[in-house]
Image (cartoon, rainbow, N blue to C red):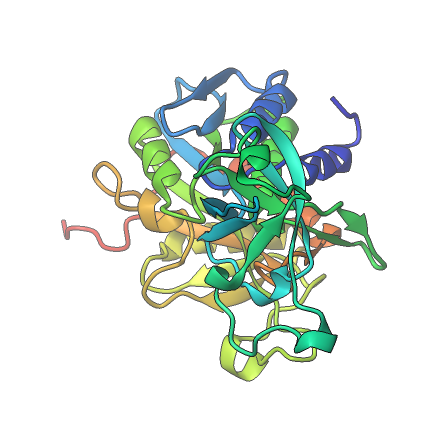
Amino acid sequence: METNPHDFLYEMLRTPSPSGREEQLQEKWLEYVKSSADELRTDGAGNAYAILQPEAPFRVLLAGHSDEIGFMIKHIDESGFLRVEPLGGISPLPALGMRVTILGTNGTITGIIGTNAEHHGGAKEKMTTDDLYIDCGVTTKAEIERYVQIGDPAVYEIEPQRLLNESLSGRGLDNRTGSYIVAEVIRRLKDETLSVGVYGVSTVNEETNMGGAFFAGAMTKPTIAIALDVTFATDFPTANPQKNGDVRLQKGPVLAKGAPINRKMNELLERAAKDEGISLQYELTPKTTGTDADQLRLTGSGVPVAVLSLPLRYMHAPREMISLQDIEQEITLLTRFILNLTGKEDVKPVHVPK
């Protein structure tokens, strides 16, 4: 594996991991963390676990999901064109003209999403994924069926690219970045003295059903859990900070506040940020978080949760953008948070009077 941790992030972003087909990425993730963890595990959902101090009674679960949005092949016509179903919250309009990788049953192949020439009227004003089709260059159904079957997934074929000011553009930064952060926290804690068990999990299926998070919570029975995800940056021209909050790249990780969130956990995270001189931003999650935390908190007897996110521009577009500076700050913050824990923390909001 690469010695520069960012190299592994780039490798993750190059690896197709559509929701439900995360195996290739999960295998790379396990290989990357195996020398740092006391124990590795997998489960029936496809989650990958790297564990430190599994014998400790106080268990901290860090969950970052490894799956990305994409398409599923739902129909093959007689000329070999492929019709698609959305796999997660993917928008049809940005897909036009994009190159895709199809994880075919009998081989991985490349195709392009067709688009009508502007000379002939251009794209429809209102589009759905029913209007999209993939062209692999064949002329018959029999040709494409040598490679592809109904239900095979496809993702955009895009290379991660470093931009100015520590910015990184790529496909599926939501949320391979979270899975990467989990791995890096495990790696940085490996030689530290810990008072708690740490369960780093690269989860699956968040973009479609959050089933991976439920498996993870049910298997590990954590004392507390933190979902690591991305959230909407609102610092680009068409964004609306007044409506959606003021969240900016290079201004630090984003802590969620709302009914699902354990406030005492937030206080511990804020203390860790202060210890490291890291500025935090905030987002509101009044009802649900839209992250793995929503399933984690409902496992077992219930799990107190927090959500820590990276600011992300252009969510679910073919090319998203984050700041590597924000990633490093989040890794540092989580490492300090865990090192601060004594294993005796009580995060119950209310206590029975004596």
Q: Is residue 1 visible?
A: yes
- Residue occupying the point 69% across, 79% down: 237
Image quadrant containing the N terminus: top right
Number of numbered tags placed on the structure image: 0
Residue 8 appears at what percent x and percent y?
72, 32
- Residue occupying the point 67% across, 48% down: 327
The foreground one among 281 and 15 is: 15
Q: Give the quadrant of residue 218.
A: top left
- Residue occupying the point 66% across, 56% down: 278
Residue 302 appears at what percent x and percent y?
24, 43
> Seen in the image, is 324 located left or right of residue 259?
right
- Residue occupying the point 61% across, 77% down: 239
Residue, far bottom: 242
Q: Is residue 182 visible?
A: no
On screen, 197 above or below 135?
above
> Seen in the image, is 1 located left or right of residue 351?
right
The foreground one among 88 and 289 is: 88
On screen, 344 above or below 346?
above
